[in-house]
Amino acid sequence: MKRWRCTVCGYIHKGEEPPDKCPVCGADRSKFEALEPEVDPAAQSPEAPAEKTSAPQPHATPAAAAPTGFQKILAQAHDLMVKYHAHPISVHIPNGLLPVSVIFVFLAVIFKCEPLAVAARYNMLVVLLAMPLVIYTGYTDWKRRFGGNLTNLFTTKMVCAGIVSGLAFIVVIWSFVRPGITQGEASLLWLFMLLNLAMLAAATVAGYLGGKLIIFPGDE
Ligand code: FE
């Protein structure tokens, strides 16, 4: 049976024709390239890595006339960031702290406990400070691993990153300027909690879509 690989996300499709649309990243059929026919697994050497485990091929960057020393160093840094998964690693900072911060905000309101609100605001500050790194490594991954193809999946992830960054900025400024927000006026408090929940939802969507871009051995 023929096999086709999505050049955007690395998804492998088995069939006579490539699919109209990649079920993982949404790229259209023109983005699929034909692979060698499948080898009988029994005949394969145990050391040979399965096709599915191979990361999507990094796309060659257009050759600049003469890259400067700085450009070479930057390119090497980007290669290392992609190779050692800098984006999934950095994304764990906000993805770990954001739910904690949101939960603390709600607990601070329910139990009228100001120390939890303080903890929430410092956690959210770290989330905000981590976002430039998350966005930079994500952008590098997108350009290098996925050729900068702007499919719905990547657009959604970028919008989510923008929502998280923007709302984290608002929530941090708000909670440091008005430290008593969790014990304050109800209408403002509802808005504050709503912003926290919206941020959590955006981070969840971005994380879910990011998980779809990781192809595990044996996945179809
Ligand atoms: Fe794809």
Image: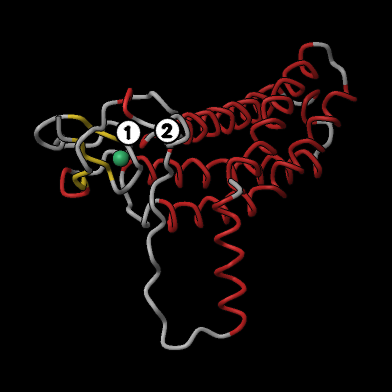
Q: Would the CB of label 2 be found within 8 Å of ligand 1?
A: no
**Coordinates of residue 176 in the picture (x, y in percent):** 81, 42
Q: Where does residue 193 sit, x and y in percent of width and height?
A: 65, 26
Asked whether mark 1 and ligand 1 are closer than 8 Å, the reply comes as yes
Circle 2 residue: 215
**What's the CA distance linking mark 1 and mark 2?**
10 Å
Say whether residue 133 is left or right of residue 112: left
Furthest toward the bottom, the residue is 66
State the SS at label 2.
loop
Q: Ligand 1 sits in which quadrant?
A: top left
Q: Amino acid at mark 1?
A: Val
Residue at image point 37% right, 24% down: 219
The residue sitting at the left extreme is: 16
Nearer the viewer's eye, disc 1 or disc 2?
Answer: 2
- Residue drawn at point x = 36 percent, y = 57 percent: 147
Q: Quadrant of the C terminus?
A: top left
The three-letter code of the residue at mark 2 reads: Ile
**Residue located at (80% from left, 19% from top):** 108
Decide if residue 31 is on the left or right side of residue 46.
left
Residue identifier under label 1: 24
What coloring was used for the rendering? Answer: secondary structure
Lateral position of residue 16 relative to residue 152, left or right: left
**Left-right relation of 201 to 126:** left
- Between 176 and 97, the one nearer to me in the picture: 97
Mark 1 vs 2: CB contact within 8 A: yes
